[in-house]
Amino acid sequence: MKRLALPSLLATALLLGGCISMAPDYRRPEAPVATQWRDAPAAQAATADAATANRPVAEIPWQDFFQDERLRRVIALALENNRDLRIAMLNIEKARAQYRIQRADLFPAITAGGSQSASRTPSSVSSSTSSSSSSSSASAVVSRQYGADVGFSSYELDLFGRIRSLTDEALQTFLATAETQRSTRLSLVAEVAGDWLTLAADRQRLALARQTLESQRESLRLTEHLHAQGTASGLDLAQIQSSVESARADVASYAAQVQQDRNALELIVGAAVPEEMLPPEEALKASVALAQIPADMSSSVLLQRPDVLSAERSLKAANADIGAARAAFFPTISLTASTGFSSSQLAGLFGSGNRSWSFAPSISVPIFNAGSLRASLKVSEVERDVAVATYEKTIQTAFKETADALAVRATLQERLDAQQALVAATARSYRLSTARYRSGVDSYLDALDSQRSLYTAQQNLISLQLTESSNRVTLYKVLGGLADGRS
């Protein structure tokens, strides 16, 4: 070993490290759900959109899915300012750094150093060890030692894959964090869209309430004129006055609700939303587009949802941890090696005769640990079983969310058609009742009942329109949308 050099030691160490892994072979668990949804065929006819037809929802960027330019700008503002998303991004950076730290253990940490030591031996000590016959000739001795070396210390040969399994675990944890960030981003987009649409609906309700109040005030002015002429009773006048005050209360209530909606939107966005980005009253009619959902769509599409992918990454991390726990039962071999120069004179430190090296292998064999290694392996196996159950539960939850959204979607168009027909019918009834009242045929009570029925029908139509738009956003979310989530 006279010519043993650090490069050859390093190459030998890396070769001995091997690629052995004692982790169990990973197999994706079977999805504990049906292969198809019962309501997917019924929903197909109601969800086709020319702009996104024949494209899986997961492949549609949110910029293509949400058609209203104001909503796009609000979502972009939220993606830039939302604190939850910012925390998720920082968690990714943290997980990436932790993975790099763990991965570094696969390789020796090579360091270079220089040293210098000096020591002085007193004359009284040096005289006692001197071979000189006269102690008076002894004097203090100063000795110096210089050294320069490069090497690595306590590098573990990964013969049984312990470090490699821990590295795989760190990698899967990092990838799971990235999927969690993608899920957070998707949820943020859906929540911003939902709050924006809710604000649009309440602004539309406020406009309807103001329109109704103005109509009631016009009726009040007419009735006051008729009452002054003696052709309208005091009861009619009182009923109209109560109707006006009720409409005023509705206007005040919806005005407050609109402000609360805006506050909620700005909270989730993380910044003030300019007035030009707020939804117009007609926003519910064409704010989102929805990809066509095939009648034979398989539930396997849920495997690409970010929360499902994150759960699977966590399962893989738990599987890799078993390999590390198994490897702990076997011996651990570590190497410490260095090569360099050593001399008592600094000027001659790098001379050919001053070459030095050291090589210190060590082995540690577990003999008795009171069952801690076996218990650690059991913990890893149980954690893997927990991860399997969590993964299956995540798929079941995803299936239920999608099934619920499809079930709502299947009847929405019919409900909208029926509600629109109801609004038209009550509008005709209100016009006829008002005409009969003004002609003196009926009392104002009939016209008031018709007006209330029309107002209620219009409010319900707005609610249904909000449900329809929100359902589109929900489907986009539960089917794993946001194809550009990594950009």
Image: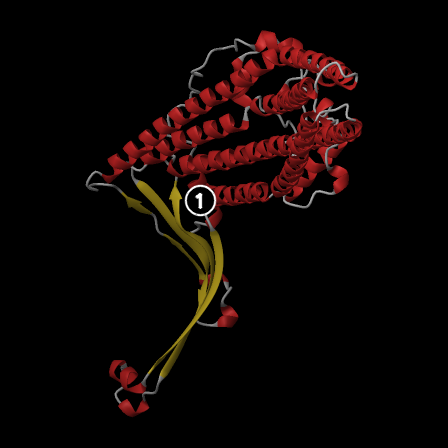
Amino acid type of the residue that numbered disc 1 sits on in the rendered structure: Asp
Nearest the eye: 116 or 192? 192
Q: Position of residue 6 (x, y in %)?
A: 46, 50
Q: Is residue 100 left or right of residue 324?
A: right
Report the number of numbered marks: 1
Nearest the eye: 88 or 98? 88
Name the image quarter holding residue 12: top left
Q: Residue at x 59, y 25 (%)?
A: 477
Instruction: Answer yes or no: is residue 296 visible.
Output: no
Q: State the scheme by which the image is colored.
A: secondary structure
Q: Which residue sits furthest bottom?
A: 136
Q: Position of residue 435 (x, y in %)?
A: 78, 16
Name the image quarter holding residue 485: top right
Q: Which residue sits furthest front?
A: 230
Name the image quarter holding residue 50: top right
Q: Residue at x 31, y 38 (%)?
A: 328
Q: Compared with residue 190, is residue 299 higher up or lower down, i.e. above or below?
A: above
Q: Compared with residue 150, is residue 383 higher up or lower down, i.e. above or below?
A: above
Q: Quarter holding the C terminus?
A: top right
Q: Residue at x 36, y 35 (%)?
A: 324
Q: Is residue 345 left or right of residue 296?
A: left
Q: Position of residue 286 (x, y in %)?
A: 74, 23
Instruction: Answer yes or no: is residue 207 visible.
Output: yes
Give the residue number, with chain letter if any, for mark 1: 105
Q: Position of residue 465 (x, y in %)?
A: 66, 21
Nearest the eye: 192 or 76? 192
Q: Is residue 237 left or right of residue 315?
A: right
Secondary structure beneath dot 1 equals loop
Crowd around label 1: few <14 · some 14–19 · many ≥20 (10 Å):
some
